Image: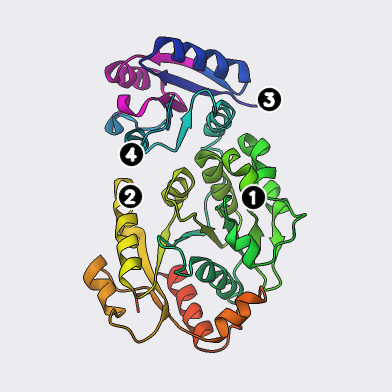
Amino acid sequence: MQEVARVVVALEATDVAEEVMHFLDRTGSARVVGTAADDRQLIEAVRQLEPDAVVAHPSLIEPAAMHGPVVLALDTRESVSSLRAAIRVGARGFFLWPGERDELAGATAATVTATDVGEKQAVVITVHGARGGVGSTFVTTHLAQALARRELDCVLIDADPTYADVSAALGVPDDVHTIDDLLPLVSELGPAHVGDALWVHPAGFRVLASPGAERASSVSGPALERIVRVAASSCDAVIVSLPRQLGELSLASLEVADRALEVLSLDVLSFRSATRAMEVIAPLGIGARVEFVVNRAARAEITPGDVERVFGSKPLAIVPADRSVPRAQDRGQLVPPRGRVGRSFAKLAERVMEGGEAA
């Protein structure tokens, strides 16, 4: 019999709190064990009831007191201040009531099995590009190829349902399984479920495709985190390609990551965008895990050395510009592993797996 998530609901509006409570109880996968109308009541409820999840307005959440439960932020309207508050308190998801109640139900159901995942053995690597065009998709796919060449079992997850650039760049067929197919199973997800959903690329790594823009809203942060953790329990490396927008899916993936790669190009706008991205993820407290990859490096006024000056650390890898890259991309092909580009990714693969020093 499936276990039921124990939930505490904390909302100032009594009528909304009652709607949420009755809805979650009716799902059969969650049970509301307590409610709170302010921050003090919430702290006490968490201390006494030890719930699996807290569903609350971000303004009522005190991060220091939320040890144990998964925090899911809920509001009746979307605003910049509310989203920022959700990020600040470390919420695993942000949901609008009542429009996203089904997504909320899935997220709460996923919390009950968070401790049931097998022991993590993979290195989890996220790849993000704050500015469009820096080549984060290129870095993601070629890092996967380099890891596979090291005879490592690598799973690449396309976590950008809006654009699905990784799935498109790799030529993933339309009829393969996607993240969307795993969502109904998320509360009981195991390695076999994930394995059955993976498509094998000719280069030897396996891919979990994005569901596509029409289903983008169906993927929640907690569900994606669960999928990543399960995948990481049965392979050597998991690469998660993040959306450019640092929202719920990106932040959930970053929480799990052992190494978070930020892709840069040698221009002012790229550095500016990456600086803003670092500000967004700062509340997660994962700064020590963030590392920089310079892509398409060529002679320019800005040099790889400026990465250390601006961001405080040397780039982990420097991928040189190469005229063969656009031709390969236009054909949906990966650049051959031999050559300057291939050697740079071989070094990157070695460093992310073995903790090597930056370039």
- Residue tagged by mark 2? 280
- Residue positioned 63% across, 76% down in the render: 330
Image side of residue 109 versus residue 93, left or right:
right
Distance from label 2 to label 3 (Cα)? 40 Å
Q: Residue at x 60, y 38 (%)?
A: 218
Disc 1 secondary structure class: loop
Question: Which one is earlier in the sequence, the residue at label 4 or at label 1?
Answer: 4
Q: Which residues are magenta?
A: 32-61
Residue 155 in view? no
* Amino acid at the residue labelled 3: Met
Q: Residues within 10 Å of mark 3 (few under 14, many from 20)?
A: few
Q: Which mark is residue 84?
A: 4
Q: How is the image coloured?
A: rainbow
CB contact under 8 Å: marks 2 and 1: no
Q: How far apart are the two marked residues, 4 and 2, measured between alpha carbons?
A: 9 Å
Residue extending furthest toward the left = 309
Q: Mark 3–mark 1 contact, CB under 8 Å?
A: no
Q: CA distance from mark 2 to mark 1?
A: 25 Å
Residue 234 seen in the figure: yes
User: Which numbered mark, 2 or 1, is in the foreground of this view?
Assistant: 1
- Kindly give the residue lying farthest to the right in the view shown: 175
C-alpha gap between disc 4 and disc 1: 26 Å
Pick the residue in front: 158 or 41.
158
